[in-house]
Amino acid sequence: MKKQLYERPLIQRINTGLMNKFGTKTEYSPVSHIDGFAVKDLVKEFGSPLFVLSEQTIRKTYKEAVRAFKTRYPKVQFAWSYKTNYINAVCNIFHQEGSWAEVVSGFEYQKALNNGVPGHQIIFNGPDKSDDDLRAAITHNSPIHIDHLDELYRLTEMAEEMNKRPNVAIRVNMDTGIYPMWDRFGFNYENGQAWDAINKIILGDRLELIGVHSHIGTFMLSPQAYATAAYKLSDLVLGVKKKFGKTLQYIDMGGGFASKNTLKGSYLPGADTVPTIDQFAEAITTALLNAGFIEKDLPLLILETGRALIDEAGYLLGSVLANKRLSDGRRATIMDFGVNILFTSFWYDHKISPAQEFSSYTEDTVMYGPLCMNIDVVRSQVTLPPLKKDDLVVVHTVGAYNMTQWMQFIAMRPAVVLLGMDGKPHLIRQRETLNNIEMSEVMPEFLNKHGLATKLTKVV
Amino acid sequence: MIKESLHIFQKAFINSYAQLFFADSKVFAWLLLISSFISPTTGLSGLIATVAAIVFAWWMGLNRILLSYGTFSYNALMVGLVLGGHYHFSWGFLLVLLVGAVFSVLIVVWLNTVFAKYAVPSLSLSFLLTLWLITLAIRGFSNVNLNERDLFRFNEWYLLGGSRLVEWMTALDQLEIPQFLEVYLKSLSAVFFQYNIISGAIILIGLLIWSRIGFLLSALGFVIGYFFYYGLSGEFTQLYYSYIGFNFILTAIALGGFYLIPSRASFILVVIVMPIIGVFITGLNQLLGVWQLPLYSFPFALTVILTILLLHQRTYFKRLKLVPFQYYSPEKNLYQYTNSFVRFGKAKGIALRLPFFGEWQVSQGYDGAITHKKEWRYALDFVVVDETAHTFKIPGEIVTDFYCYNLPVMSPADGYVCEVADGIDDNGIGEIDIKKNWGNTLVIKHADGLYTKLSHLKRDSLTVKVNDYVKQGQIIATVGNSGRSPEPHLHFQLQATPYIGSETMQYPLAYFITRKEQAYQLHEFEVPQEGAHVHHPIQTPLLVNALNFVPGKKWYLQVSDANAQKSTLVWECMVDAYNQTYLYCAKSKACAYFVNNGTVFYFTTFYGSKKSLLYEFYIGAHKILLGYYQHMAVKDDIPLSSFHHPVLLWLQDMVAPFYQFMQVEYQSIFEELDNEYAPNHVVIRSTISALVAGKTLKQKQHLFTFANGCLSQWSILTQGNTLYTVSCNDQL
């Protein structure tokens, strides 16, 4: 006979009568398996906490996104946003699927090269590009997205020095009717900065203008904003054709599509409110197709989608360290993962599921991380069944940004495992050790010794 | 002007001779001319009549092109040959000859005008009518006398070449050759109204040079005639005595390889028709004998005309294909036909494209099991599927879960919107509306009798109205789930009438690509099969632009051959009166006709020297897809004549109507590309393989390098050696 489940007793008010806005009861169900892999076994093998990525979900999400655009527009190319998750195994899944690379720093650029991405398929974005970075990008024929005039001037000088004609695009910011309006990246559309940059590039005749780019925001909840951006960028491309007779190769709509996460303060869960990839695709492609291009000149549509492609494929597995009752009577659960590795918990109410069976009784809980810091709150309020020490939980939709924005603070960064479609878990990043932390440290000679140990021995 | 007229005159003259064998070979014509002079007066009289007919036709202002083919003069030639053989040369005779020539032109024009209605040739009927009239008339002219030259040929030869010629000719005539061959040669010579072995032999050589199939047919015709007479115990001596053996030979060539594409069926037809000639000969001889008129080619003309008339009345066309464009050679007729049948046999006047972006799957094809039945059997249903073959994402309970729902639908070709149905709501998943079974629908008219219908569209998504003109690729609606549609899909059909609910018709799509796993294949003028993953071919801008030859554009080629000899060529893109574009090489005067339809660049025909570099280009760039697909070979068929191996080709010619053991295969494939969407450097390799019985005998490769917006480098390789390297430039 199966052992009966024990849960500590709870006192709960009974909600009777009609349905109310809190619902009847929790719809949580235990997540004991991910893609057929037992959470318990994964933690046993790779330790807790543990980041898990589903290869199947990554590929499926990517294909769905590509399909959404390619069934609406003839020329579409995705470029994997490295900063969203630049573990090489992850990048290579996207490259296998046909995605280019989009990088925003020298080291990311190098990473993409090392992953075997041809230079012309690495888009170099970002406000910070050193001379060395630019030199590498020019040498490898990568499209360089110019962020500001100083970069434009420097690039022009380097083109002369290297006697090369770099491929460039300009980053354009604009009013797409959303708040806050992002105007810190690139040149403004409305006040003519964008045209100023275009004129400087084309008339300067040192750089090859091949496209325009914009990145209108992040976690965008309105597809209409993209339609506006696509329309304004098309206007630039058509204007360039009219003024200079030059056909630009592409329009890069940047990233920013929202994932199914729930933003803090949202009334409804993200899964219900976030536009689907089809809605974004429809808004963008309709704007481009109606912008007035002749069929032959339709620009390549590049998308630097990051979050929406990987967030749902990522899970964080963790264990309960302790339960306690706060002074105001609220229950608190302390987990072995905190804001150090789950950076996104600052702005999302992540969905958290227990990984083992439980009864239908739930309790509101504050979920803390393990750090010795007051801000280490994973969920300020979450409804969960009673959890015991060493019980496992699964945090959903954590594939984006966590594995790049995590920090080594107080605790080590955990391992990352890829749940392969071959039915095996693959370790794609090892758990950090003390060695990882100290390997970059340098000890000056005079600090090599101190007397603490000797004093102790004397006392003993 | 005079030079041009002289040129037409020359052509007309020489073609008059070749026409008697349906040929346009100059060598053959000269040999025929020579053979006619074996009996010099006969030859001379034929020549005079021909010239007279040409001059008359020219002076009267008849069509110069038909004139140059010999159309108006070959009957006169025959009249001349016959008269020259029968009558003494005198002023009176010359007058009769000239009258005969002119008269034959009148009759030709009359007969051609009358017969054009039935699309049958008048053949030698004009000759026969002219000759019969003159034969009857001449009996009243006392100044024109029959000669007995044929009985005293030795006298004539003696006058021309002394006793030596007489000895030669006697020796030749008395050569011990089998009777069968002798009769065959004499029958051949009878086409030119002689009956001696020498001219027969000369004609035979010419016939072989002109056409192997023609020779084969002549032999076949003769053999059947020969045995027909044996079989019926007919009077075999007739066969050459009255010159009528050639009726079998000419009929066999005309039906077996000239008016029909040579094939097994055309040979069978020859076998069937031959005995009819035999009956004609014997029967008509009795009839015409009343007036003592000769039969000559009458049985041939009647048989061929009647047979062609019958062929035009067919309603079932599986076998016995009439020659669509006359190349005046059974070989060319056959090879061109086979080649163009393979290449363009399925091509249709209106090129339709898939009416959507991206890759879709044919969920129900022609004769589908669900609804494509009876009058509506030739329809296609399309859906979008994911990698797990599902058409929806979980849970798939509402229309928006379905991948294809609300995707844009475009016009498959230019045309007018002629019917619109809108305002029908989408069904829930699994429900069907059998009252308004087509749902929201658009019918577009592309041409008279050619309409496309797109059905089950989303309500209020239609962006066009009746009488709007839509361009190919223009977005006109989005996919919905209205009508008899349990889940969102696009219904696409062709029909001959403009109504919603019209009967469907078969009609292919011009170009589409299918994908199986990661392997792509180009389809031309086909109907996609059920289950196929299809998409419209992509375009690579560099190729589209580089091969977009605008009339007037010039190309400068720096050629360096295997011995590093350098030369320069200039090619120009021209356009002819029929708006067909071609490349013209001023140096070799060669023309290569091409088509660039935005999807594929291909050559259609070539005129000029096969030694010219333009010919190499015509072969090497025979078909190039204008969009990049890795590892996808574009295949094509190349005419056998591109294969330079005379012995094998002759052998192939002999058996060509029955079996083609030689093939020339073409394929082009992308070798290098620096950027998928906006490449600046593309290399395409085309391979031409000559196969004999399935084994590669010879192979030639062409490497085309496209860079800086044009074809910049081109090299031709064979067995690892570079034959030519050409750098091309569109500016000097």
Image (cartoon, rainbow, N blue to C red):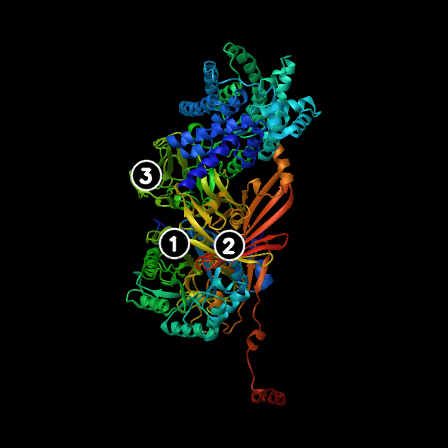
Give SS at disc 3: strand
Q: Do the numbered discs 2 and 3 sit on residues whose CB atoms are within 8 Å?
A: no
Amino acid at dot 1: Leu
Viewer can see residue B137:
yes
Quadrant of res B189: top right
Q: Residue furthest top?
A: B290
Using the image as rendered, state which of residue B283 and residue B473 is in the foreground.
Answer: B283
Q: Name the disc covering residue B416, or none.
A: 3
The chain letter under disc 2 is: A
The residue lying at 35 percent from left, 45 percent from top is B475
What is the quadrant of the C terminus of chain A in the image? bottom right
Using the image as rendered, state which of residue A96 and residue B46 is in the foreground.
Answer: B46
x%, y% of residue A200?
A: 35, 69
The residue lying at 57 percent from left, 89 percent from top is A446
Q: Which residue is mark 1?
A: A298
Q: Is residue B304 above or below residue A114?
A: above
Q: Are marks 2 and 1 on the same chain?
A: yes
Viewer can see residue A54:
no
Instruction: Tell me the crowding category of disc 3: few under 14, some 14 to 19, or many 20 or more residues within 10 angstroms, Cα based.
Output: many
x%, y% of residue B269?
A: 56, 23
Give left or right: position of B635 versus B376: right
Please report whichever mark, 2 or 1, sits nearer to the chain's N-terminal start. 2
Q: Is residue A255 above or below residue B45?
A: below
